[in-house]
Image (cartoon, rainbow, N blue to C red):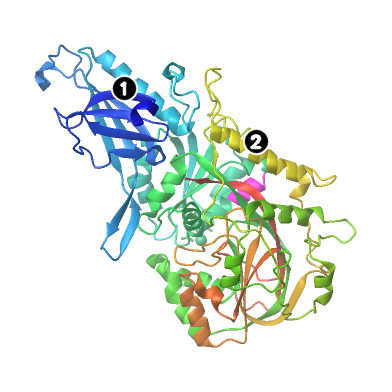
Amino acid sequence: MDEESALLEDVFYLYPSRSIQCIVRLLEDKLTVRATAGHIKVVKYDSVSLKDVIGCHVMRGRTDGYYNHSDIRPDIGDPSAYIAIYTYPLTYRGTFLNKQQRRERYVLTFRILKSSRQQDNLAIAHHWRVAILWMLRQSSLPCAKELSRFPSVPPSTRRLLVFINPFGGTGKAYQIYRERVVALLAESDIEHDLIITARANHARDFVNTADLSHWSGIVVISGDGLLFEVFNGLMERDDWKKAIKIPVGIIPGGSGNGLAKAISHAVGEPYNTNNVISSTLNIVCGRVSPMDLVRVQTLEDNMYAFLSVGWGIMADIDIESEKLRAIGEARFTVWALVRALGLRKYRGRLSYLPVAGMEGYCKKNEQAKWKIERSKTMDDGFQWHKNYTKENGVCDAGLSRKKIERRSKSFIAIDSEEVTLPEADNVSQVEKHNYTSNNLEETYNPIFEVSKDENICNTKENDHMDENQSAISDQQSSTPSTSNADMYCSKLPSLSAPLPENWIVEEGEFVLVYVSLQTHLASDVFIAPNAKLDDGVMWLLIIRADVSRVQVINFLTCLQSGTHIDNPYVDMIPIYAFRLEPFSTDGFLTVDGEVIKSGPIQAEVLPSIARVMTL
Ligand code: ADP
Ligand code: MG
């Protein structure tokens, strides 16, 4: 079967062996290696998925001299060509009972010796390289079977802008870059420009004014703080609508790496065993997924968050543990215990706009019954924009009149009504777009001019992307008299203006109010198990003041597994917007883990506005 569907097939020597010959086949989705003699397995991985291949390089033998097939001695020259194929397959490590998945680097190298003339061998190697690269970057070219229609040059390379915060986390970001990231970028032929930040806001100021057309993506090697700078720098540009579509990648190098973990979780990649490789693979493989941001407004400032807004015990843990930065992510665990023992209560007013029908929803078993399905959520998300009218200043989020009338104004417990929401098939369902193509015309992508050669067919993936993109813009344009730009205009009344009647309002003492956009705030904080990168909602977690220390410790312990939401004293509510008015300045208020001045704050979701690099 493999024989029939092989795009390329040839017999090469297996390097470093001088005698083993093998049949190498390039198929639509994988590369296979079989020994010519017998059926013995000659390589560790004799079938490698192209999804696990990041690139390949051609090398030449040492001398271009006369050569005798039966006598390959270095002194008379080696006219061979070599092709090294860089793969990162998933492997299992650990004991029988505690097996862990991880990515492992594995290089397949073949010696090509068909002719005594080195240039003939190099030509074969180059043909293979070009074919493999086109298969990787333009996955499943429908016409690839006609090999003459493979272009003769490899697809263009990408150029990335890389930021490193030398003081992020334990200060190892540059070392991570030098020792582990550079090699993967080189293996994938990705060029990059490096900026080591010299001060806070360096990255923000740079992306705010730079000509982004030089790069096809921005990568941050740091914690969530530097990423926050990048998203805000992009959103503060005059051309923000275009700028925010530039793909952004994250390699964990800080003490808070929530988004890196959330992306790995979303694409089903192992993270804890080798998070640098997992995250770098997201960057080199060349695909992107849409991601929501939220617009956050305070009395002084507007900003854009991708991770969280926090108030109460978890915000205090995040900020007060800064003094333990040297111990990395463990600082959160240590300080969690300190804060739980010295439990504080925080007075304030919390108002929020829940997803229709989900006002009283909080428990995990209920969550299992409905998971937000993207299209539905998008619909709701857009509904909330659609229902916005100038008269009331806000949408009604599709809530039925009956439900709205039943609400009281303080600590409302609305019995969850029979809500039937569509089931999403898979939590890790991430919509992937290839950004190594010419189809992201909205983004900066000058390097990726796909050959205009008519013989090169469009890829299936690109077709798929077009449909999705037009689906998104259809939804946007279906908003009456609302342009795409308006869709991202604030639909919230000003912070001092009253909120519409259909919001739920709670006033009193809280232990925690935490709003998350992502599944994870750190590798061991699985705060919103049902969140998705682009579900179009925020996940509001509330713990009110009538809890004991033991319950709080229990909550913090359960955060790692995501089972905290099963506790009766924890509410987890999907919302479109919220406003929080602390009654005193005790306690920190954080946005994406960074502290901001305590005071009234409100936020609303901007669905699918950003692009992140994903496997
Ligand atoms: P961590 O996760 O360890 O907090 P971050 O990447 O979040 O690491 O960085 C923390 C803060 O450091 C961010 O708010 C960022 O603005 C700031 N920062 C970035 N570069 C520098 C620098 N060169 N010197 C000081 N602060 C910086
Ligand atoms: Mg940080």
**Residue 236 belongs to the span the image colors magenta:** yes
CA distance separating discs 2 and 1: 36 Å
Q: Mark 2 highlights which residue? A: 442
Is 281 left or right of 403, judged from the image as shown?
Answer: left
> Where residue 285 sits in the image (x, y, percent)?
45, 40
Q: Is residue 18 visible?
A: yes
Crowding near the residue tagged with mark 1, few <14, some 14–19, many ≥20 C-alpha atoms within 10 Å: many
* Residue type at tag 2: Glu
Is 434 left or right of 95, judged from the image as shown?
Answer: right
Crowding near the residue tagged with mark 2, few <14, some 14–19, many ≥20 C-alpha atoms within 10 Å: few
Given residues 92 and 277, the one toward you in this image is: 92
Q: Give the range drawn in magenta.
A: 231-239
The CB of the residue at mark 1 lies under 8 Å from ligand 1 = no
C-beta proximity under 8 Å, tags 2 and 1: no
The quadrant in which residue 331 appears is: bottom left
> Where residue 309 sits in the image (x, y, percent)?
62, 65
Q: What element carries label 1?
A: helix
Q: Which mark is residue 125?
A: 1
Q: Residue 527 carries which label?
A: none
> Where residue 437 sits in the image (x, y, percent)?
54, 31
- Furthest toward the front, the residue is 1
Q: Is mark 2 on a helix, strand or loop?
A: loop
Counting residues from the N terminus, which is met first, the one under dot 2 or under dot 1?
Answer: 1
Q: Residue at x 10, y 18 (%)?
A: 70
How many numbered marks are there?
2
Is 529 left or right of 67, judged from the image as shown?
Answer: right
Q: Which of marks 2 and 1 is in front?
A: 1
**Residue 281 belongs to the span the image colors magenta:** no
